[in-house]
Amino acid sequence: MKKMELQITDTLGYTLEADMTSLFKRHIHGIYFEYENELHEKFSIKPSIRFEYAAREMNYQKLNERIGYYNLDDGWIEEDPNPEDEYNSPNLVLRELLNERLGEGSDASKSDKPSPEIAIYPDLHFTYNITEKKSIQFGMSKRVERPGSGGHGGGKMQIRPFPRNLYSEGNVFIGNPFLKSAYTTTADISYKTPVSRGFVMLNSHYSYIKDPIKWDSITDFGTGKSVTTFLNSDSGNEYGADFFMMIMGQTFGGGITKSEFKHSNGDPDLNENTTHMNMFLGINFPEKYIKLFDFEFGFYWMKMTTEKGSMFGDDGTIWANIGLGKSFFNNRFKVSLKLNNLANAGGFQMDETYNIYPSSEETFPNGANWGTQRTNMLHSGRPRTLTLNFTYSFGKMEDDKYKGRGGGHDHDGGEMDIGF
């Protein structure tokens, strides 16, 4: 059981004060079987199946609610201190969301204990070897994304029912503990072929998703205050292609995925089409190959567009790192220099414009009409950083000590740090 004491005040002094409690329990039991058989030198099969029993219970409650006007000097005020204002409707869209979820009243609550679920998740892959090193693989599988188990939103943030950043001027974030699990059925086909000193892999895929978990923005259009949360769309389709290439230990790849989501309520966040593109490169030349120094370089580029705008900028965003290293005294002493986030990019940004359609004859003060809403958000990631490292190895014992950890990777910079 978790508890939060909540107090949030809008710019006019209108205040919501309440205690919120939450209980979330989930039990998952499973058993997994896998079988692999090479029927002959050209053809092999690998089926597997997972059986799961899942049960969960949620209880979400709002206690001791108090609403009214409040300021630091006078405390609670019974009446509106500015009744002459042309527009002074309360800017507490969070309260409207809580009322929608839990019902109105000072002790509103909602409980949900669905019947335990018994589910089967099959997985089947066929491989046809065209030659010794060239092959085609076909696969079909079913999987589940449970709310709070991962995905966008930082996992548990999806179901955390307590708001964050209460005093943010533009947006309040709150999870949704009543989300349904999303079920995905995927079919994919891949082709692998050798090239000079390496190989190339091509892949295409299609997925159908039932109850996909989506971001959703709920806005009081009269004042601009909004709540970001999660909801289930009805269904979704995703399809795309990608490639991966490795030549002499250097990697290069990328892909494109298109998604279509639908919901009967017309919410633009739950009914949208998106296109996601990405590309990456990793280069690592040890000093023993180029004689002068170690060299490593890597980048990851991503672009996401929707019908309403773009995320990560119109041209996408790129994270890139570069590093140099030099060894001395029979490899006992090493100097390495790294520049992380070469393009000084990263973080998260969103620029979208929504068309707002009325669901009733509701109107706003001063004759404000339904129209468009623009969301422009920027969250900075890690800044560009320059790092200089000096490493000295005192003997073979020290080398052996570290060799047992991390699988023999170069501890002085063999792996790139690319991302947020």
Image (cartoon, helix red, strand yellow):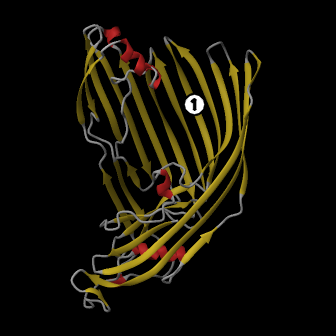
Number of labels in the image equals 1
Q: Judge whether 170 appears above or below 135 on screen.
A: below
Q: Is residue 351 visible?
A: yes
Q: Judge whether 106 appears above or below 283 on screen.
A: below
* Residue 42, x across and y down, in percent: 73, 17
Q: Is residue 139 left or right of residue 108?
A: right
* Residue 315, x across and y down, in percent: 34, 42
Q: Judge whether 48 appears above or below 183 on screen.
A: above
Q: Is residue 359 left or right of residue 222?
A: right
Of the pair 30 and 312, the residue shown nearer to us: 30
Instruction: Read off the residue under disc 1.
Output: 203
- Residue drawn at x 43%, y 48% is 305
Q: Quadrant of residue 377?
A: bottom left
* Residue 122, x across and y down, in percent: 72, 41
Of the pair 268 and 165, the residue shown nearer to us: 165
User: Farthest residue in the right direction?
Assistant: 39
- Residue drawn at x 68%, y 64% is 114
Q: Is residue 358 visible?
A: no
Q: Quadrant of residue 226?
A: bottom left
- Residue drawn at x 36%, y 74% is 7
Of the pair 256 and 347, the residue shown nearer to us: 347
The secondary element bearing badge 1 is classed as strand
Considering the image in quadrants, where does the C terminus appear? top left
* Residue 154, x across and y down, in percent: 45, 51
Q: Residues within 10 Å of mark 1 (few under 14, many from 20)?
A: some
Q: Judge whether 409 appears above or below 351 on screen.
A: above
- Residue drawn at x 32%, y 43% is 346
* Amino acid of disc 1: Asn
